[in-house]
């Protein structure tokens, strides 16, 4: 598969994640951020493990739990806290800083070069997201803002470490390890901090199934596959597509209006993603450190 096809396949993941806010606020019971995050991660991970039929071994147990905690336990818990406490626009703008954090961490942990145009594109993307989703009456809840920033930093670190630590297994298996570990990390916190869920309606169950299967297992298999093939900076920039999808869904499903500033923001976001792809296309992907032990399995050829 060529690079363009890899980019399109990976971009499908954040495009689908753009539906998370509508599903969370419209279909799920409010006030259960940790429970919802756990029910999104653990079933998705178990589903992928049943498909892959392979467990971690050696150091990959510890790495899977660390990455699962960053990419899913902490990130998703903070994501749902943000979704419950802030308007979608504020939450999306906070999450958009992830691309800048990834560029910096990739330099520190992978030795990846920092391209000036990539930084400019990331800043433009943040500005585009702000134009796209922020409104003058957007509430700025301090807890929600803190949760959004913590979530962005956790996902950025998890993204870079997922590239640094590439196991000799397919991306689908790697995603299954992390999702399962992330869900298991959340179980004791759910039992300790949140009350039991109320009786779930058909809409609640449908929302949870959608988040676990489509928004979890399917999209993160694409995400980690793209991360291995394209590198952290390219993949992180695709995250800007998530708020674009959220706004388009709000317009098409909820009857929300798009004004000129939002259309301009959408154009800036798409342009920033395109610019990062062009700049990074000529940059060699920073290779992960060589394995310390013998590789008994290899990634199948595409």
Image (spheres, grey):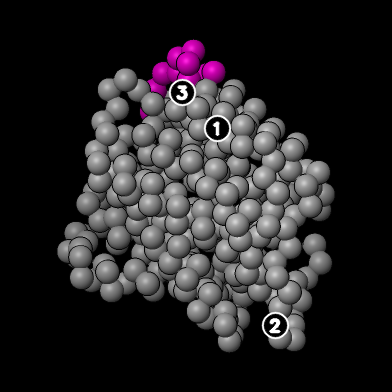
In terms of image quadrants, where is residue 256? Answer: top left
**Compared to 290, does 37 lie above or below?**
above
**Compared to 12, does 161 lie above or below?**
below
Find numbered disc 1 in the image and state the secondary structure of the residue it sits on. helix
Q: Is residue 154 left or right of residue 275?
A: left
- Residue 8 visible here: no
Q: Earlier in the sequence, mark 1 or mark 2?
A: 1
- Residue 60 visible here: yes
Instruction: Residue 68: give x, y in percent of width and height.
Output: 47, 67
Label drawn at residue 123: 1
Compare residues 39 and 267 and report the one nearer the observer: 267
Q: Residue at x 55, y 32 (%)?
A: 123
Q: Which residues are magenta?
A: 252-264
Q: CA–CA distance between discs 2 and 3?
A: 47 Å
**Compared to 262, does 90 lie above or below?**
below
Q: Earlier in the sequence, mark 1 or mark 3?
A: 1
Mark 3 Cα-neighbour bin, 10 Å: few <14, some 14–19, many ≥20: many
- Counting every numbered tag in the picture gives 3
Label drawn at residue 292: 2
Magenta-drawn stretch contains 257: yes
Residue farthest along the top direction in this orientation: 260
Mark 1 Cα-neighbour bin, 10 Å: few <14, some 14–19, many ≥20: some
Instruction: Residue 174: give x, y in percent of width and height.
Output: 60, 70
């Amino acid at each position: 598969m060529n690079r363009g096809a890899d980019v399109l396949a990976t971009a499908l993941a954040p495009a689908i994640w753009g539906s998370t806010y509508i599903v969370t606020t419209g279909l799920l019971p409010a006030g259960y951020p940790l429970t919802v995050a756990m029910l999104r991660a653990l079933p998705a991970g178990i589903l992928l493990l049943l498909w892959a039929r392979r467990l971690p071994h050696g150091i990959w147990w510890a790495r899977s739990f660390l990455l699962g905690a960053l990419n899913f336990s902490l990130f998703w818990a903070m994501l749902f806290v943000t979704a419950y406490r802030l308007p979608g626009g504020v939450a999306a703008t906070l999450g958009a800083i992830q691309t800048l954090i990834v560029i910096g961490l990739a330099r520190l942990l992978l030795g990846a070069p920092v391209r000036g145009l990539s930084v400019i594109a990331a800043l433009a993307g943040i500005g585009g997201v702000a134009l796209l989703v922020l409104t003058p009456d957007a509430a700025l809840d301090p807890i929600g803002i803190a949760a959004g920033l913590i979530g962005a930093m956790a996902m950025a670190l998890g993204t870079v470490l997922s590239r640094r630590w590439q196991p000799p297994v397919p991306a689908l298996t790697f995603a299954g390890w992390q999702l399962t570990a992330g869900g298991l990390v959340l179980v004791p916190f759910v039992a300790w901090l949140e009350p039991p869920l109320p009786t779930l309606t058909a809409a609640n169950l449908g929302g949870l199934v959608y988040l676990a299967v489509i928004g979890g297992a399917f999209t993160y298999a694409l995400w980690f596959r793209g991360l291995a093939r394209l590198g952290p900076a390219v993949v992180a920039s695709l995250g800007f597509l998530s708020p674009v999808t959220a706004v388009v869904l709000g317009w098409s499903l909820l009857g929300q209006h798009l004004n000129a500033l939002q259309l301009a923001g959408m154009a800036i976001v798409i342009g920033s993603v395109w610019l990062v792809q062009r700049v990074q296309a000529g940059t060699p992907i920073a290779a992960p450190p060589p394995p310390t032990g013998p590789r008994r399995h290899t990634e199948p050829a595409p």
